[in-house]
């Protein structure tokens, strides 16, 4: 078994502690824009693209003056493919932009959520970030796939606090389907860098064609799976959020973040005990997009599958 480059330096982390704050919500519910705005406040440490790609050698690169070269390799990759954004949206990319920690969790491709098996990997990453940054700011973490997993996270990370972001399920599904169609219509080199298996799937005509079919307007298998997953996670949230102490979480909606960005961010910071006011207006650029026809026909079905969640947040069909 190959030893990770950082293992010989792990003793340096023995006295390092961290305070985790998890941003959770459905995929395409606004977790990324919330993550990036909170990063701009300067009151958090975040998990960057560089951290994820080199998570097993961050200490080694830092202590041997190789970090700058690693960062440059990422920048060179973006230059090679002329990447300014994530391609699936208008959000900019860069070696130090915050990303989801899910991409460094899997061993042999699974799982993408925090578990007993991989929690030490995430714990080590957080300690490394604190060690490298040399401060005691909270570590801000984001993974939409852990939205239906927050009680396990709380068990594994007792000091964890949560920022939940919600969005109307129909709008979420519309964005999810559009994203899936786009990444299999044209290769997304940003995603291929983070997740090599996607690049392999796209490059294989058979799997690329299968995914295109699954998320086409004619065979709604992919959409039905996404509805099932959303219904499952919405039930989990409604059934279990009350088991968290009130001081351990704050809940906002994408809609209010778009309407009142500064007020919403200030309320999040205040709940976390961070006494600062932040002007978030310039970071919000909501887009009006048409709802895919297939999703329009399933509007009532989607609402019924997520009815309790929708009622909790005032969403209507």
Image: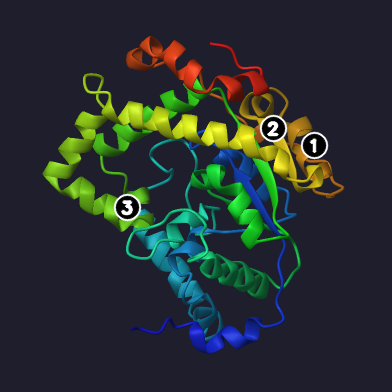
Q: Which mark is residue 192?
A: 3
Element type at mark 1: helix
Q: Nearer the viewer, mark 2 or mark 3?
A: 2
Q: Nearer the viewer, residue 11 or 316?
A: 316
Q: Answer whether residue 140 is visible to the viewer in this image.
A: no
Q: Residue at x 44, y 26 (%)?
A: 173
Q: Answer whether residue 59 is visible to the viewer in this image.
A: yes
Question: Where's residue 59, x and y in %?
Answer: 54, 79
Residue matched to label 2: 252
Question: Where's residue 277, x and y in %?
Answer: 83, 41
Residue 242's place in the image compared with 197, above or below, is above
Q: Quadrant of the N terminus?
A: bottom left
Element type at mark 2: strand
Please report contact status of discs 1 and 2: CB closer than 8 Å, yes or no: yes
Q: Residue at x 45, y 74 (%)?
A: 69
Circle 1 residues within 10 Å: few <14, some 14–19, many ≥20: some
Return the disc, 2 or 3, that comes first in the chain's sequence: 3
Element type at mark 3: helix
Q: Nearer the viewer, mark 1 or mark 2?
A: 2
In the picture, measured across the screen, residue 202 lies left or right of residue 298, that is left
Q: Nearer the viewer, residue 67 or 54?
A: 54
Q: Residue at x 34, y 12 (%)?
A: 293
Residue 29's place in the image compared with 73, above or below, is above
Question: Where's residue 235, x and y in %?
Answer: 55, 32
Residue matched to label 1: 267
Q: Nearer the viewer, residue 296 or 81?
A: 296
Q: Nearer the viewer, residue 71 or 12?
A: 12
């Amino acid at each position: 078994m190959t030893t990770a480059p950082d293992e010989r330096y792990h003793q340096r982390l023995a006295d390092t502690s961290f305070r985790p704050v998890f941003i959770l919500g459905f995929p395409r519910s606004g977790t990324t824009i919330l993550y990036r705005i909170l990063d701009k406040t300067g009151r958090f440490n975040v998990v960057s693209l560089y951290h994820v790609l080199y998570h097993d050698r961050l200490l080694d690169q830092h202590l041997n003056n190789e970090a700058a070269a690693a960062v440059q390799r990422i920048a060179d990759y973006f230059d090679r493919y002329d990447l300014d954004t994530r391609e699936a949206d208008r959000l900019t990319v860069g070696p130090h932009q915050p990303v989801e920690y899910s991409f460094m969790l899997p061993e042999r491709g699974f799982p993408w959520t925090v578990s007993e098996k991989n929690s030490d990997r995430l714990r080590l990453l957080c300690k490394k970030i604190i060690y490298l940054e040399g401060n005691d700011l909270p570590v801000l973490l984001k993974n939409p796939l852990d939205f239906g997993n927050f009680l396990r996270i709380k068990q594994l990370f007792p000091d964890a606090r949560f920022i939940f972001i919600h969005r109307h399920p129909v709008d979420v599904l519309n964005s999810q389907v559009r994203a899936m169609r786009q990444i299999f219509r044209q290769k997304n080199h940003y995603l291929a860098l983070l997740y090599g298996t996607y690049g392999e799937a796209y490059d294989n005509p058979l799997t690329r064609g299968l995914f295109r079919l699954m998320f086409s307007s004619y065979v709604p298998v992919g959409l039905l799976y996404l509805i099932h997953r959303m219904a499952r996670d919405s039930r989990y949230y409604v059934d279990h959020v009350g088991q968290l102490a009130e001081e351990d979480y704050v809940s906002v909606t994408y809609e209010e973040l778009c309407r009142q960005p500064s007020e919403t961010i200030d309320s999040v910071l205040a709940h976390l005990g961070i006494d600062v006011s932040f002007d978030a207006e310039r970071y919000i650029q909501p887009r009006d997009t048409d709802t895919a026809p297939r999703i329009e026909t399933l509007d009532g079905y989607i609402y019924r599958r997520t009815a309790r969640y929708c009622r909790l947040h005032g969403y209507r069909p």
